[in-house]
Image (cartoon, grey):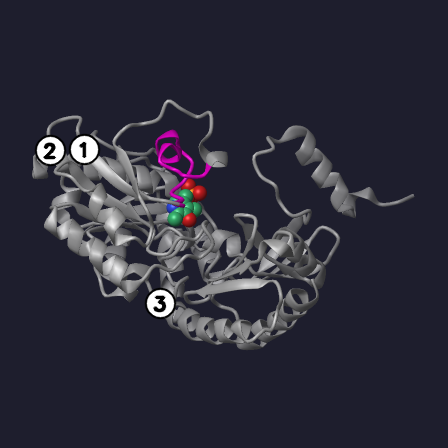
Amino acid sequence: MTDTSTDARHWIDLEDRFAAHNYHPLDVVLTRGEGIWVWDVEGKKYLDFLSAYSAVNQGHNHPKIIKAVIDQLQTLSLTSRAFRNDRFGPFCEKLSKLSGYDSVLMMNTGAEAVETAIKAARKWGYRVKGVPDGKAKIITFTENFHGRTTTIVGFSCDPVARDQYGPFTPGFVTAEYNNLESTAAAFDENVVAVLIEPIQGEAGVIVPSAEFMQGVRKLCDEHNALLICDEIQSGLGRAGHFFAHTMFGICADAVTIGKALSGGVYPVSAFLAKKEIMDVFTPGSHGSTYGGNPVACAAAEAALDVLVDQNLCERSKELGEWLANEMRAIDSPHVKEIRAAGLWIGVELHESAGGARKFCEALERAGMLCKETHTHTIRFAPPLVIEKADLEWALGHIRKVLTTG
Ligand SMILES: *Cc1c(COP(=O)(O)O)cnc(C)c1O
């Protein structure tokens, strides 16, 4: 008799039958994780080179984060914001001091943090800037990814994410990413904010020029509009900095963070802003039942401690520069362009390579998990706690797959 309980097919079939088909995952069924490693139900070990889209920057099951969460779960898990709890204030202080932003608004998912940013920008536009009611505009960019709510997909340029979810929320205009003239042309007196990813992750690790980002900052200043950076994927060390936008020598008026904010153990996100922006929110004007709950605060506090104590921003920068250089030295007929910032590398393949998916599948067979984005790009994003020896091992497989695949 065969033991079907260890056959991945069993779980894949259940998922196919009973779960919505809104993803196209690799056929690997994971059951355990530790640090940079994950194991599947058949006992095979893999190096995680995606880190749950950069949520697991601190590595899987980081003992400090897990302990903080378990301790908090055994003490107090949810009060709602109808009452206060003793984790919320201290956590907000820590995040404010670490980030340099005066004030914190905690939510759960990244999309909610972006929705919060949109609400803040609009209210700021009406109350502070003096835009006529209902006229506020926010500039967004081609190839953006900011989440999945109906408002957010309304300004997506990706037909798969957007089609047949309308009618959409008005008040958004699209400028071309990394094109300052296009951005300048999108401004008028009713623009309240620019919402931008300082590096576009889902689009395939697109790093704009410093001139562009500095130019956007200047346009925002000239037009009295807020610069809001979505750092949900690019922030918290992934690009080699606490916030990716600071590498361009600019400062955003507000940012959104999520993903690695909890080190992958709990959905925690936040909108961070200067006081005069955050003060547009008054009691009842925005909220979330789980936002800022004690478990979220405990997880995020520990996850931020790990980021600082283990120097993850610096590690990402140094190891990322080394890895990108090694990858650029690979002589592959398939590679069109390699883009990198910290331990975040997009390898765009020529169309003749036949799509990135089969390269990801070849890496899976070699014991490395990564995922294609936008058909022709492989995105590499290992946990930032990774050691150089493990990167060297991975590089060997990447080299083999890119030169023979
Ligand atoms: C992942 C992501 C989001 C959405 O976060 P969710 O937690 O999936 O809602 C928003 N913006 C960026 C840049 C992201 O990478």
Q: Is residue 151 magenta?
A: yes
* Image quadrant occupied by the N terminus: top right
- Is residue 38 shown left or right of residue 258? right
| Mark 3 burial class by Cα count in 10 Å: few <14, some 14-19, many 20+ | some
Give the SS element for disc 1.
Answer: loop
**13 in relation to 346, above or below:** above
Residue 387 at what x, y percent from top left? 53, 74
Quadrant assignment for ligand 1: top left
* Image quadrant occupied by the C terminus: bottom right
Amino acid type of disc 2?
A: Val
Can residue 364 be seen by looking at this rendering? yes
- For the record, the magenta segment spans 143-158
Amino acid type of disc 3?
A: Val
Q: Which mark is residue 136?
A: 1
Identify the mark nearer the N-term, 1 or 2.
2
The image quarter containing residue 335 is bottom right
Identify the mark nearer the N-term, 1 or 3.
1
- Residue linked to disc 3: 308
Query: What residue is at 60 percent from the left and 73 percent from the top?
Result: 331
Mark whose residue sits in front, 3 or 2: 2
Residue 286 at what x, y percent from top left? 25, 32
What is the spatial separation of the Cα atoms under label 3 and label 2, in whole angstroms?
41 Å
